[in-house]
Amino acid sequence: MKQLKHKRPPVYPGDRWIIAENDFSPANNLLSETIFALGNGYIGIRGSFEEGLEGSGCRSIDGIYLNGFYESVPIPHAETGYGYALNTQTMLNVTNSKIIELDLEDERFSLVAGTILNYHRFLDMKTGCLVRNVVWRSPGGKEIEIEVKRLVPFAHRHLLAFEYRLKALNFSGRVNIRSSMDGDVDNHTHEEEDPRFSATLGGLGLSVTGIMAREEPLVMLQETKRSGLQLACAMDHRLSGVPMVFKEVEQDQHRITVSYHLELKQEASACLEKYAAYYTSLDHPAPDLPGLASEMAVKGREIGFEALVEEQKERLDKLWDKAVIEVKGDLFQEQGLRFNIFHLFQAAGSNGRTGIGAKGLTSEGYDGHYFWDTEIYMIPFYAALMPEEARKLLAYRYSILDHARSRARMLDHPRGALYPWRTIAGEEGSSYYPAGTAQYPINAAVAYAVNKYVEMTGDYSLMLEGGAEIVFETARLWEDLGTYIPRKGHLFCYNEVTGPDEYTALVNNNFYTNLMAQWHLDYACATARRLKKDFPDHYRRLTEKIKLGEEELQAWQQAAENMFIPYDEALKIHPQDDGFLDKEVWDFTATPADRYPLLLHYHPLVIYRYQVCKQPDVILAHFLLSDRYSLKQKRRDYNYYEPITTHDSSLSPAIFGVMASELGYYKDAEYFFDITARLDLDNILQDTPFGVHMANMAGSWMNLVYGFAGMRTTNGKLSFKPYLPQSWQGYRFGIIFQNNRLAVAVEDDKAIYSLLEGDILTFRHRGQDLKISGGEKVVVSLN
């Protein structure tokens, strides 16, 4: 096992509900900007300071992002070819509305000037509020106490809210609070020489097309340069505590500033509340945007900051009640797990036209693109705790189905659909087709997520409202992509595909691809049979719409029944692909620690020549289709592939952790859980300053629920096989299964199942059939 570096002591003190920093550390600033990022699924804001750090030499990435709001950027191909992706989309850093600056007469407050006498910043995961307390002495000796609170309300998806309090400690005098919005913004991560951050070249700033600054609320209008999208940002304020001497509004071509001039006496306090709202032409007609943004900013002011915090707490209380998260015996692991789930709560909020980016809304890393991470890692979480969010994420996939059809035609498939490897608006955004477009298994990932949602919720209406059409159109591609190969016993094969492992590309008969294609084709045929039987009118309309006939269904079934699944009789393992075992094993002992991740230090062709995996491939197939193979076979595959996996991908530890639990490798399972729980808080991969790892965050929950508790859903049936990690005294979690809210607790030598909502739930515990009624609990042995 390649040991991932795990930083101890942690950057942030251990606490069940609080993430805190007790001093300002320039060295950790970028990391803290990510860790203290807030969002609601539509708006995301990094944890950069209201006053900024300009001129300090301290690195900062200011960022406010709107999910789905993008610029279209041509992909520069020095040598192009037919079917290459032509354009990518990049999520934009939008109008900076968080700016609040403070002048004590002629001295500007800054954390890199004067003296910090006290500093404390913390994120309260019960309220979703970010709080910063600073006591600061100016170079001239004036001391002031500042408290800044920030909130991104779940209930008001277009709104940002700030509360800025100050108290003069040892002086009386003129104080000026300057609140601004700045339209002169650009993306940042193109500055990094790392392909994981951004593929764009910068110069993506929005154009300012109008400013409305006669009276509050103040409005700035902007538009993109290529994608034709428009944006309105409005801000409104409330000042309290001391009388205002005067107020002035200034503007230039990119910026609007409201200055509040106050006379502050010693020990006196003042408070400025600020409300900023964003609306775009993606959701509303462009002429309506200024009015909508103004109305929302005013609404925020009328509700008030404390009332918004109380609303947020009520929402989070309900979400935490569903999650029922507790880890007894390791405070830091519980904190990490809870932090990860909090970010998943923050990322929720799709309107059916947006997904969740690999970095959420914590940075523009990966250009804000949506990947298969959502379907394989995140939808299982949302289906179990926030099923309405899972459905909206699948509705997004349906909304871009026509783009997927067009992409399939471009790749010479006469029918069916191929989902883009990375995208925002539906167009393929990957410039490197060997590790992008060639990842055909994304089709199976989307179909798998459809099935997972239906299994967990029992809501078959999804299939009548786009789900079946997704499953059929993506299944069609599998039948067209493959062929019966005489040298493989006339079995159905797939050539020149790329599986989940990104350290191999363009291979024949990737085990994961073939197995998932087989499952997908079987599932599509089963779906057709059910629709034909139970919903004949809908089935007739759908098959007429997409021109799907019985002969094609028979071809799917035949391909599934004759799928080639690679197996090596000598080693008794599944080769990752036809040629994988013919390669030399990577020399891990001769690879220094500072040469990881390999993709940053070796050309892809070098990596492709060796047996080395970035992330699980065969092992991921074993997890997703856990009933296909025996434990003995899965152990042989795990024992072969784990030692040659670098875990350079954040997608890796979670899956290996779940499988280690299933296979009885409990020490491995605890190690991988610790990595997944603390990956971002401890910056284990050294790239969290550029955004969190959303899939890994969901993976930490999967490690607990699918790993330690052994939860599985097979053919609509729920089962558990829990055990207690050696270093813990117990754990708890909750799920919603087919409208039944179940709490699971494991402690000592027993498991306790409590049906908190629902009538009757039947499930299996370690092979034993159990039935529980609403309000009851069942206690059973772990043995």
Image: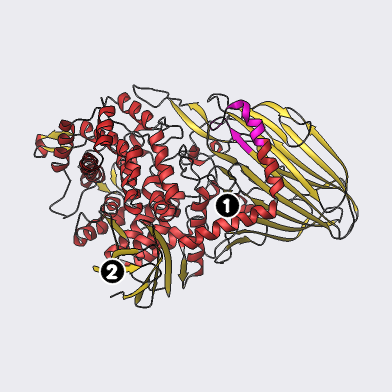
Relative horizontal placement of residue 469, taking residue 299 as reference (left or right): left
The residue under label 1 is 31
Instruction: Name the residue nearer the viewer: 62 or 445.
Output: 445
Badge 2 element: strand
> Could you tell me residue 495's position as x and y percent?
22, 35
Q: Is residue 365 visible?
A: yes
Amino acid marked by disc 1: Leu
Counting residues from the start of the chain, the first of labels 1 and 2 encountered is 1
Label 1 CA crowd tier, 10 Å (few <14, some 14–19, many 20+): many
Magenta stretch bounds: 278-293
In the displayed structure, 159 sits above or below 289; it is below
In the picture as drawn, the residue positioned furthest to the bottom comes out as: 748
Amino acid marked by disc 2: Leu
Relative horizontal placement of residue 38, taking residue 512 as reference (left or right): right
> Could you tell me residue 527's position as x and y percent?
24, 42
Instruction: Name the residue nearer the viewer: 273 or 432.
Output: 273
> Could you tell me residue 396's position as x and y percent?
42, 38
The residue under label 2 is 770
| Residue 554 part of the magenta segment | no
| Residue 291 part of the magenta segment | yes
In the displayed structure, 635 sits above or below 577; it is below
Badge 1 element: helix
